[in-house]
Amino acid sequence: MGGLLYRIESPADLHHLSDKELDQLAQEMRDEMIRVLRLRPAHFASNLGVVELCLALHLTFDFRKDRLIWDTGHQVYPHKLLTGRARQFHTIRTRGGLMGYPNPHESDYDLFMTGHAGCSISCGLGLKTGDDLQGHPERHTVVVIGDGALPSGIVYEAMNNAGGLNKNVLIILNDNKMSICPRVGGLAQALDRARLAPLYQDAKEWMHSFLSHLPIVGNLAHQAFDQVRDALKALLTGGMLFEELGLRYFGPVDGHDLPSLRRWLSDLKTQKGPILLHVFTEKGHGVPQASQDPVTFHTPPPFAEVGPDRTIVSFRKSSSPAYTDAVSQAIYQLMREDRRVVAITAAMCQGNKLERVRADFPDRFFDTGICEAHAVAFAAGLAKSGMRPIAAIYSTFLQRAFDQLFQEVSLQNLPVVFCLDRAGLTGPDGPTHHGVFDIVYLRLFPHFIVMAPGDALDILPMLRFALAQAAPTALRYPKAALERVERTPSAIELGRAEVYRWGRDGGFVAYGHVFPWCVRAAELLRQEAGLDLTVINARFVKPLDSDTILQAVHQLPWIITVEEGTLEGGFGSAVLEAANRAGVDTRRICRLGLPDRYIEHGEREELLRDLRLDVEGLCHTVRELAARWPAPRAGAGHPPNLPLAGRRAAVEPVQHHRPRA
């Protein structure tokens, strides 16, 4: 490996490079990110935009003892390249390789595993306060937060506290006019006004020069100018918002001018009190298509071909539709049918595939920015007014609105529909993004109806059912290719499971998208070992279909509950609770799900295989249980009160634009 990049073992090596070599290093860092994108999907545009900022920070501070926090963390690739991980960078977002977010287990330069936006200032203020209390006031604390994360409520709580404590914390506002999608709201408009700031900076420098040459009245004039300066700042930069919270505002500064950035940071390093430096960067800087279309290039598909001057010639694309596609199509259809239906997202329009909804129903589409707590309370207000809001929020991010789920939605018993994307394992994004706790935190609340489509055929009927309820509802679905169990599905009824087949040798009770895997495993075991297995598509965890599931517990030698969520408090726990209430022996109920630990990053299929949640793992568990508790050979069939779904005994991915073979 040649070039400068692989000679950088630590940030200390940067000090031996000339300005020309630093420019070369910045280009090599971008080239390395392009190289990785030829291998696998990864965060791209956001990382291209902070290369010079990252270099300037490491050239100005010594983060072996000083503190650095990146918020949200998906723009941490340049930081990893400079902190001894360049030779391992090709492993990023692979199982056992580097994580795509900061990870303290990888490096002492990473302080927090940050994957949710807005918490950096709070953590940085806590670090600085702790360092001061423990006799280390010389340690600098630097926080880098994006303008997309800035609207988060916790940011203002932290800035207000920082102004009150008057601690020496440097906040870098990385302003690239984006979160994943273009930023929204009044704050975005205020930051846009700051792009007039060259006028402000030029006027300030000219006035200082002019006043310094006035006789006698110069000092008085300077005092007057301070007042004029503040007025100009309020008019042109929006900086007074931060100053009113007790932060000293500086900037805006060109985030791609490395020498200028270094001068600013060196000066601010000596300043006292909480400071905000406003830095303009371009998301996707250095790759023409990425800067022109930062939404697509936030996490693009792998590159198939890269041309000269870092131009992206083509992508490697998959044609398989995902659960997200099916849910977004269902939302669109239901919004066409009912003008009361509105859609809400928290800065994830692209992730939730709601661009068509935004385009065709602009008056009924609301992007709140990265403000999940506000989004849920806003939805509650819409529901109270008589509208039918659908809040499409990732499972891992809905946790941020736990109190609003309780107070504003559940306690009021308001008909808000929650579509929880990325439920289950999200693969390379890792533990910050795995949606594994939603079953637990939603089934806690009275009034809530909590369900999950078993496959593609459940999605539209289930969403239609949810909108017809007079209570809050939630449905979860994975970041995965859409699957379909070929059958004539039974109607969606409140708290009613679907019995796909009834067998005598044991059974699967599947909650959500694991249903097709259980069907496939049952068929393999029938062919391989002649086992006749029950498969139940549970559909609901609250209210649970206790009658159907406990009948299976009574009549079968064993059952396996299957879910892609944490076992602690999850679907299997709900089944155990129901059995306990009914006085049923629970020793032959086996629960499969995610263990009580954080699951590392890796390809989704790899993680499921390791956790024995893939088809092979399900078959392995069945063999163990069948050997331990074989079924009596007499008596089969299915209970007369449990109608079977009409089926055609096949499980297959849903295909785009071509007939089923």
Image (cartoon, helix red, strand yellow):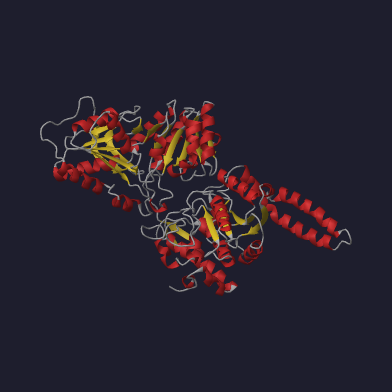
**Above or below — where is 365 with respect to 281?**
above
Q: Nearer the viewer, residue 402 or 473?
A: 402
> Residue 424 appears at what percent x and percent y?
37, 45
Q: Residue at x 23, y 29 (%)?
A: 551
**Above or below — where is 526 with respect to 577?**
below
> Residue 250 appears at what percent x and percent y?
67, 56
Inspect this view and state whether residue 389 appears. no
Quarter holding the C terminus is top left
Furthest residue in direction right, as rendered: 216
Furthest residue in direction front, as rendered: 134
Inspect this view and state whether residue 319 appears. yes
Quarter holding the N terminus is bottom left
Left-right relation of 477 to 217: left
> Residue 412 appears at what percent x and percent y?
49, 27
Q: Residue at x 66, y 58 (%)?
A: 272
Q: Residue at x 40, y 40 (%)?
A: 438
Q: Residue at x 25, y 30 (%)?
A: 550
> Residue 476 appears at what percent x and percent y?
39, 39
Left-right relation of 8 to 540: right
Furthest residue in direction left, as rendered: 634
Q: Quadrant of residue 485?
A: top left
Question: How many dots with numbers?
Answer: 0
